[in-house]
């Protein structure tokens, strides 16, 4: 029934209520007689049942009769002490604010326990603010720390935390197995009985008073702290719900461990905390009159400890109190906290975040050593000593000249297993698998699941020649890693445990131990870092080390180095590692295969060919299941077979880029550098486990929470993005409703939609709003959703934050500043080195000038790499910059050099060789000459722009700044007075020159600047200081942005070359994509139509294909942005 | 030299006025060009120095005016993302949509008086493009109607609920079928990048039209 407006009842209602009460009193003894098991545990308790409950209202009424309580059929605020409900609408929650709303289990459990339990455990809503799913909360036990009500000021948390601190150890200690103990503890926390709320409020009050003047920032911090404590609290409350309790607790332990790991790298939040503490401190003195003063002091101390303690755990855990909620067993996808929850426990997530963390760790090491003016490499020292003992200096000189680049690929041998059996010698040498399942490998089948069908589906999809097995009852827990002994029996990583058990009956399973993984991984990285900081973190158990410089410096052979590293790792971690070495990453990784287990192998350049021919194609990076099956259909199984295919064939089959990569890889060629810092392309959060929505609202709130997760990650990375993509997995029509794997997604169709924002954002709310819009646009049945992912792309750094908030971002700026000075000197150094080498041995490869100390290509390197075609257009960026600084210098090259027609040839010739090369290179870059390698020696073509007006008497020569000179404009000689500038001449100048002149005059601080405002290029003339936002650059194709220029460019491209280069095509695609983003559809339309005309007329069919490729790509972007494709006739 | 920025109150006003005026002309012209109404109700007028057609049906004019009147505050606050004119067939399936995508730079500043004449040139170009758009579009089936939609940014809808510019002329959430077109094709008509405002990032008005090739 509907709740009548309370307290406004007439006499009739009053009469009715009292009569009902009488009736109840009369019935009670009779019931007691009938049942026999009476008590009076509920004396003083009067309940009112709202809505559906289990047990039913009638049953509850009977129970209350039996156990001395009261049952009210109508709610009376003054008399009713507890409201029993399992589900309340939002409005009622608002109405019942401050009342005790309890789940019916409170009654049944109390009866079972034989005494009245504290209701706090059973409160229905603890934190609902908006729409929420109270029914979910009803499941499982609630965290005692979440007893605060939503309406209370957040500072209440403080009280609870500090209180619980004292209690925590005990709770932890006793909890396993006995629920009542926890209850007792909870009761100890808060005075028992019906005055609970009152007393709690009273208790909290002084705290409030003490903290009142705090600003909202401090409050926010407190929230965060609160989360931290919840987190640490998680395992014990949830272990009951989990299949593998040890996993969950160790997971969160690992969490805290990893937090403390980052804490050194991100001291960002510290200031905030400090200031808060300052806020906390003076309070007692400012309120000396309060009676609660001593108590307060006490509280303060406790809080502070807690704050510091829990700080380390905060950065990754958001969604505040949500994490206190254990996942329900079936409808968990709907739950608010599930996302944080999921990510804090998902094994895959853990392991994948580690890679970022280790990357960060390496970066932190590097910047620290830069700041300290040079690092101490203990491992290096050791090796040096070793060497000094056994060899002479001649060898090292020899190395200096013959050296090749040498990459080490360090990979732990079956990492998870060897960590798992580290302290269990009894398992060594036995088949061991790391998995979450520890039973016999059989589970009962759940209704709705149809594993056979799914298995068939996957089989068909993967074209496996199927193994016939009784899958129905086998455990679907996957094996994360298995020992070599198990591998011999046919067990593979990723196999389902049930199946593995069949193959290898004496297979032992070892649980996950995240903390140990973390420890071992960390010490592995520490070991590596003691040799060099040139490390690329690949994952938690493997890393790439560029040892080129190190070997030269130490004068040892790579084998010695590898041995030293392996011994070190073995000593420090107790686990073995294998090291593969090669002249590039690809070869190093391949060598590792040969090195395993527990060995090392150097793949020498002379044996590369023989070696690689025998390798299966699937061993190449990027060749996965689908590609290898495609290759098999082409009759290719080894790299040797692959070498037989021509590049054009490969490009036709796999697309231009992949084709080329394959072509190179199967010959052992790989020019990827070891990158210690990787630029992130996207930030995303995705969850496809346990997604079972029943209502649209659940999906909405899930999206909101997922957005918050994304926000958290973006903030963590200090990034903002413009493109938001929503990815949804939907149950494939006809697929079983319940997949074979518990909570898994089963067979799904994948959908994705994206939207482009006007401004980059990292706001969770904004992302959520967009995501929900996208979600509705997809028009899905929420019941069939099995996975949801949100991805933010087109990232940019978020330091230009106008609001100035966000302390976590401060780090990157500071780092940048710190890193700047030494970095510049570094690159200067490189420059010198190159010049010297150059003088000795003739032309060096032009890539060496990229001011990147790691990539100094030695003059004696094999011709295959040094005569590598110049990274023509887009690819250039890939080779060079690793740090923001480098990026900038590189950009300078491509943008600020004037067009060839404006540079006096004699001046050019007078320039040093390197600078000249660079100028030429940037012209090429701009002109987009696709066949760059052949143009290396030829003078640059003059562009179609008119020659400069000589009457101007100005020479503008803007070159890339020498590294280390922080000047922004180029060299501008003899700037005439503005009045002398002939407007006509000015107008005749090419656009770039006009812009340069404008800015030059502006820089002179000339008030007459307005007069020379370029009549045809008004859009460039902005007072930069005014613009708070970075204006989006106009999309350009190789520097051109006027349609006529672009047309000329395209025309030249298509007519002058017979076969387009992949880079150029990609460049065009990129340009078109930018046009779409710039919403300049008209221009895009014209460009596409023009290209279509040009390319389809071309006699070469390659051009036609190139056009199709471009068009396809553009249509995808247009489809994503506008929801429909361009009509190209 | 006076420089107006977005913060100046009347700047948004100016943009909104210009844009709404243009939209009105454009909508009338589209109605004429796409033959939604019999040509008899249209009169030839002169706008932006070119001949345009304008309906003289009072109720139709009132609808268009009222709608734009409501759009104006949105544009003023840079909350309108797109103004869409949907042309539907008898069964109320959208046949084509004319999308005016509006994006304003985050920071604007105006100076000098080239403003008006230049914008006028650009708007004229756009009007001319509309008047010849039937060349690239297929003929509409007879008996078409039209409706005007606004795509707002973010939470603008909520404010729209609160403030009814014209009494008894509230906004209605568009039917999904009005917004969504199956297998639509996009034909960009004209993009104008106005530099009138002497801004770093220029103001963009996009016009494009989507056309359903086959009605399913």
Image (tube, rainbow, N blue to C red):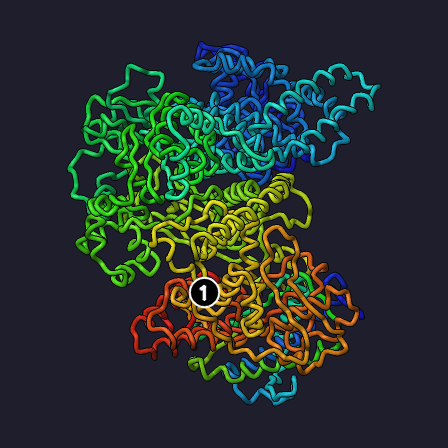
The residue at the far right in this view is A289
Q: Locate residue A874, reporting x and y percent.
A: 45, 60
Q: Nearer the viewer, residue A743 or A680?
A: A680
Q: Locate residue A1088, reporting x and y percent.
A: 43, 73
Image quadrant for the N terminus of chain A?
top right
In the structure shown, which secondary structural element does the residue marked by tag 1 occupy?
helix
Task: Please identify the quarter of the rendering in which residue A610 is found.
Answer: top left
Q: Is residue A615 left or right of residue A43?
A: left
Q: In this figure, which residue is indicated by the disc labeled 1?
A: A1118
Q: Is residue A287 above or below residue A986?
A: above
Q: Locate residue A1001, reporting x and y percent.
A: 72, 68
Q: Is residue A1061 left or right of residue A816?
A: left
Q: Is residue B204 above or below residue A111?
A: below
- Chain at tag 1: A
Tell me if I can see residue A226 in this picture.
Answer: yes
At 30% across and 75% down in the image, what residue appears? A1100
Task: Please identify the quarter of the rendering in which residue A466 is found.
Answer: top left
Image quadrant for the C terminus of chain A?
bottom left
Q: Nearer the viewer, residue B13 or B195?
A: B195
Q: Locate residue A867, reporting x and y percent.
A: 37, 57
* Mark 1 nearby-residue class (10 Å; few <14, some 14–19, many ≥20): many
């Amino acid at each position: 029934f509907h709740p009548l407006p309370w307290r406004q009842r007439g006499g009739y209602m009053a009469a009715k209520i009292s009569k009902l009460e009488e009736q109840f009193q009369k019935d009670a003894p009779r019931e007691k007689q009938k049942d026999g098991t009476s008590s009076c545990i509920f004396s003083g308790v009067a309940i009112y049942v709202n809505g559906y409950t289990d047990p039913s209202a009638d049953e509850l009424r009977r129970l209350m009769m039996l156990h001395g309580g009261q049952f009210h059929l109508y709610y009376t605020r003054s008399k009713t002490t507890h409201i029993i409900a399992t589900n309340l609408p939002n409005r009622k929650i608002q109405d019942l604010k401050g009342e005790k709303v309890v789940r019916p289990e409170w009654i049944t459990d109390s009866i079972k326990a034989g005494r009245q339990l504290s209701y706090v455990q059973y409160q229905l809503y603890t934190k609902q603010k908006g729409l929420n799913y109270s029914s979910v909360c009803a499941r499982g036990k609630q965290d005692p720390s979440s007893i605060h009500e939503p309406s209370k000021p957040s500072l209440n948390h403080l009280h609870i935390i500090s209180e619980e601190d004292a209690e925590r150890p005990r709770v932890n200690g006793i909890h396993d197995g006995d629920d009542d103990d926890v209850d007792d503890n909870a009761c100890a926390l808060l005075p028992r009985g019906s005055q609970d709320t009152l007393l709690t409020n009273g208790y909290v009050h002084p705290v409030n008073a003490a903290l009142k003047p705090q600003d909202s920032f401090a409050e926010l911090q407190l929230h965060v702290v609160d989360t931290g404590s919840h987190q640490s609290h998680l395992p014990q409350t949830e272990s009951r719900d989990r299949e593998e309790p040890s996993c969950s607790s160790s997971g969160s332990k690992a969490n805290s461990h990893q937090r403390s790991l980052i804490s050194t790298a991100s001291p960002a939040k510290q200031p905030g905390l400090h200031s808060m503490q300052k806020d906390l401190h003076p309070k007692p003195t400012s309120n000396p009159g309060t009676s609660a003063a001593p108590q307060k002091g006490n509280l303060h101390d406790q809080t502070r400890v807690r704050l510091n303690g829990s700080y380390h755990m905060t950065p990754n855990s958001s969604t505040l109190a949500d994490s206190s909620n254990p996942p329900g067993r079936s409808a968990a996808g709907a739950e608010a906290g599930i996302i944080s929850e999921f990510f804090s426990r998902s094994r895959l997530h853990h392991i994948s975040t580690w890679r970022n963390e280790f990357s960060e760790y390496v970066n932190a090491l590097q910047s620290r050593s830069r700041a300290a003016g040079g690092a101490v490499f203990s491992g290096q020292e050791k090796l040096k000593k070793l060497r000094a003992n056994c060899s002479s200096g001649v060898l090292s000189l020899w190395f200096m000249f013959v050296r090749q680049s040498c990459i080490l690929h360090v990979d732990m041998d079956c990492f998870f297993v060897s960590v798992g059996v580290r302290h269990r010698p009894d398992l060594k040498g036995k088949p061991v698998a790391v998995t979450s399942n520890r039973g016999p490998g059989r589970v009962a089948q759940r209704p709705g699941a149809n594993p056979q069908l799914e298995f068939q589906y996957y089989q068909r999809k993967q074209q496996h020649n199927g193994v016939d097995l009784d899958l129905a009852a086998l455990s679907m827990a996957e094996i994360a890693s298995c020992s070599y002994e198990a591998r011999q029996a046919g067990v593979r990583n990723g196999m389902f445990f049930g199946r593995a058990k069949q193959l290898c009956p004496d297979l032992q399973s070892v649980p996950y131990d995240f903390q140990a993984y973390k420890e071992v991984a960390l010490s592995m990285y520490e070991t590596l870092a003691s040799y060099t900081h040139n490390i690329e973190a690949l994952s938690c158990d493997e890393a790439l080390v560029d040892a080129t410089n190190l070997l030269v410096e130490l004068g040892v052979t790579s084998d010695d180095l590898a041995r030293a590293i392996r011994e070190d790792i073995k000593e420090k971690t107790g686990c073995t590692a294998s090291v593969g070495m090669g002249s590039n990453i690809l070869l190093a990784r391949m060598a590792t295969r040969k090195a395993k287990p527990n060995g090392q192998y150097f793949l020498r350049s002379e044996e590369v060919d023989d070696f690689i021919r025998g390798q299966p194609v699937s061993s190449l990076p990027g060749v996965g299941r689908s590609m290898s099956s495609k290759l098999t259909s082409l009759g290719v199984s080894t790299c040797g077979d692959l070498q037989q295919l021509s590049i054009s064939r490969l490009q036709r089959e796999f697309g231009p880029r992949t084709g080329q990569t394959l072509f190179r890889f199967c010959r052992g060629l790989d020019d990827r550098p070891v990158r210690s810092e990787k630029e992130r392309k996207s930030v995303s959060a995705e969850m496809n486990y346990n997604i079972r929505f029943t209502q649209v609202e659940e999906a909405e709130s899930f999206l909101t929470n997922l957005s918050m997760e994304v926000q958290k990650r973006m903030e963590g990375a200090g990034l903002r993005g413009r493109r938001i993509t929503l990815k949804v997995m939907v149950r494939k029509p006809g697929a079983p409703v319940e997949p074979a794997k518990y909570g898994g997604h089963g067979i799904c169709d994948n959908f994705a939609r994206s939207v482009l924002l006007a401004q980059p954002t990292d706001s969770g709310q904004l992302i959520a709003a967009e995501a929900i819009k996208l979600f509705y646009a997809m028009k899905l049945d929420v019941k069939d959703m099995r996975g949801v992912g949100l991805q933010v792309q087109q990232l940019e750094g978020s330091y230009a934050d106008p609001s100035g908030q966000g302390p976590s971002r401060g780090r990157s700026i500071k780092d940048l500043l710190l890193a700047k000075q030494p970095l510049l000197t570094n690159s200067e150094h490189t420059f010198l080195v190159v010049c010297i080498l150059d003088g000795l041995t003739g032309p060096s490869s032009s890539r060496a000038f990229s001011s990147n100390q790691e990539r100094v290509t030695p003059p004696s390197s094999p011709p295959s790499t040094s005569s590598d075609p110049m990274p023509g257009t887009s690819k250039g960026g890939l080779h060079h910059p690793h740090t923001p600084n480098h990026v900038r210098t590189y950009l300078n090259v491509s943008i600020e050099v004037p067009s060839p027609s404006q540079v006096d040839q004699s001046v050019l010739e007078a320039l040093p060789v390197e600078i000249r090369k660079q100028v030429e290179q940037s012209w090429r870059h701009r002109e987009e000459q696709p066949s760059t390698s052949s143009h290396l020696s030829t003078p640059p073509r003059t562009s179609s722009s008119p020659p400069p007006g000589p009457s101007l008497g100005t020479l503008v020569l803007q070159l890339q700044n020498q590294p280390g000179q922080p000047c922004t404009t180029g060299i501008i000689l003899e700037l005439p007075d503005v009045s002398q500038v002939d407007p006509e001449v000015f107008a005749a100048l090419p656009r770039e020159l006009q812009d340069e002149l404008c800015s030059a005059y502006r820089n002179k601080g000339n008030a007459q600047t307005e007069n020379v405002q370029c009549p045809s290029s008004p859009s460039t003339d902005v007072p930069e200081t005014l613009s708070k936002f970075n204006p989006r650059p106009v999309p350009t194709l190789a520097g051109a942005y006027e349609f006529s220029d672009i047309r000329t460019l395209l025309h030249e491209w298509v007519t002058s070359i017979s076969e387009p280069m992949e880079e150029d095509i990609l460049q065009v695609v990129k340009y078109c994509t930018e046009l779409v983003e710039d919403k300049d559809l008209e221009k895009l339309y014209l460009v596409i139509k023009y290209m279509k005309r040009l390319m389809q007329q071309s006699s070469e069919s390659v051009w036609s294909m190139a056009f199709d490729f471009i068009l396809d790509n553009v249509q995808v972007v247009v489809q994503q942005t506008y929801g429909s494709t361009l009509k190209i006739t | 030299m006076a420089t107006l920025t977005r913060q100046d109150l009347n700047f948004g006003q100016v943009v909104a006025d210009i844009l709404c005026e243009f939209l009105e002309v454009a909508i009338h012209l589209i109605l004429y060009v796409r033959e939604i109404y019999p040509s008899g109700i249209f009169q030839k007028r002169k706008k932006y120095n070119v001949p345009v057609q304008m309906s003289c049906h009072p109720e139709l004019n009132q609808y268009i005016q009222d709608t734009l009147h409501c759009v104006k505050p949105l544009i003023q606050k840079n909350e309108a993302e797109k103004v869409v004119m949907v042309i539907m067939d008898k069964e109320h399936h959208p046949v084509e949509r004319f999308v005016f995508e509006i994006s304003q730079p985050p920071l604007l500043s105006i100076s000098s008086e080239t403003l008006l004449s230049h914008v006028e040139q650009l708007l004229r170009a756009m009007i001319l493009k509309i008047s010849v758009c039937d060349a690239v579009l297929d003929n509409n089936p007879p008996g078409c109607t039209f409706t005007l939609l606004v795509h707002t940014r973010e939470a603008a809808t909520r404010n729209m609920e609160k403030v009814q510019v014209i009494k008894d002329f509230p906004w209605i959430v568009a039917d999904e079928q009005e917004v969504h077109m199956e297998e639509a094709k996009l034909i960009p008509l004209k993009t104008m990048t106005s530099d009138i405002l002497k801004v770093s990032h220029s103001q963009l008005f996009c016009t494009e039209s989507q056309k359903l090739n086959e009605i399913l």
